[in-house]
Image: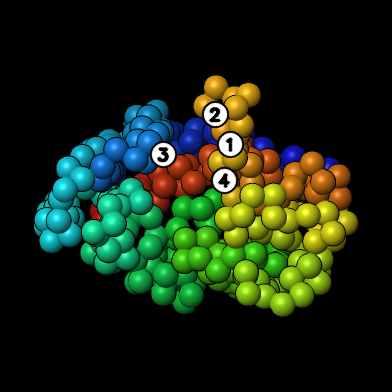
Amino acid sequence: MDLIDGNKIATDIIAELKADIAALKGRKPCLALVRVGEDPASVSYVKKKEKTAAEIGLESRVILPPVTITQDELFLLIDKLNADPTVDGILVQSPLPKHINEVAVFHRVSARKDVDGFNTVNLGKVAQEDETGFVACTPAGIMELLARSGVDLAGKHVVVLGRSLIVGKPVALLALQKRAGANGTVTICHSGTANLPLLTRQADVLIAAIGRPDFVKADMVKPGAVVIDVGINRIADPSKKTGYRLTGDVDFAAVSPLCSKITPVPGGVGPMTVAMLMKNTLKAYRLSNC
């Protein structure tokens, strides 16, 4: 069993981006990070993105509207960023307060600056294999992990466990694309799928993104399969300083002996998401300066 080291691959990508940005003339790419409220996970995620941007020489602007901001006021803020020629990418950190419609907010971000890849236009471009669009960061990171780990999906049966717009659907579309590293045959499963273990055991590559801790057991995996664990679940653990431990959607201890390759949690897919956000921001900068 080979462990796919997401930390190492993300570090390699960050180094490549740092070199690319250092070679740019004029202003540097700029990412606007909008965080509403003080959700602890959101605070941590935005700090990580801000730190990584600084590391590679990319400008970041962290905007912290109050948790009481109305949806219309947030729209006005996004409109201002959309119109700002010095801002290349916009990310609105989720979750948002309950009085704000997240989907409407994601759609308000200009497709040209939607480095999170959640705008309908960009999802459509993924389906059309239009490379001018932006791919959601976690699915893009999964494809990079596979490619840089020597996993070619051509002719492989890829089973995606989960159907979210953030991971499941876009990664299925990416695996289907007619391009190098893709060309897989894709099955999408979810919580309502009958005979689920029968389908997951057919996977040459199993991508688990169902959001249930340790859901994928050994009897659900074909020996020799590649397993990509997208889940990040917090489980209460008084022995930890934080009071919890992180686990994925895959029962790692039971499944890893069966696999040819597997991602750990943490240290697998997670680090790739931030790296791909930076890559998307550089892409937005280059498209805006064409």
Q: Is residue 290 left or right of residue 209?
A: left
Marks 4 and 3 sit apart, C-alpha to C-alpha, by 12 Å
Counting from the top left corner in percent of width and height, residue 59 is at 27, 36
- Give amino acid for label 4: Ile
Q: Is residue 99 visible?
A: yes
Counting from the top left corner in percent of width and height, residue 245 is at 60, 34
Give the labeled residue for mark 4. 232
Q: Which badge, 2 or 1, is on the more N-terminal residue?
A: 1
**Disc 4 residue crowd, few under 14, some 14–19, many 20+, Cα 10 Å:** some
Q: Is residue 273 above or below residue 168?
A: above
Q: Which badge, 2 or 3, is on the more N-terminal residue?
A: 3
**Disc 2 residue crowd, few under 14, some 14–19, many 20+, Cα 10 Å:** few
Give the labeled residue for mark 2. 243
Marks 2 and 1 sit apart, C-alpha to C-alpha, by 6 Å
**Disc 1 residue crowd, few under 14, some 14–19, many 20+, Cα 10 Å:** few
Q: Say what secondary structure mark 3 lies in.
A: helix
Q: Is residue 278 left or right of residue 208?
A: left
Give the labeled residue for mark 3. 41
Counting from the top left corner in percent of width and height, residue 186 is at 67, 73
Q: Which badge, 1 or 3, is on the more N-terminal residue?
A: 3
Q: Is residue 124 above or below residue 222?
A: below
Q: Residue at x 81, y 66 (%)?
A: 201
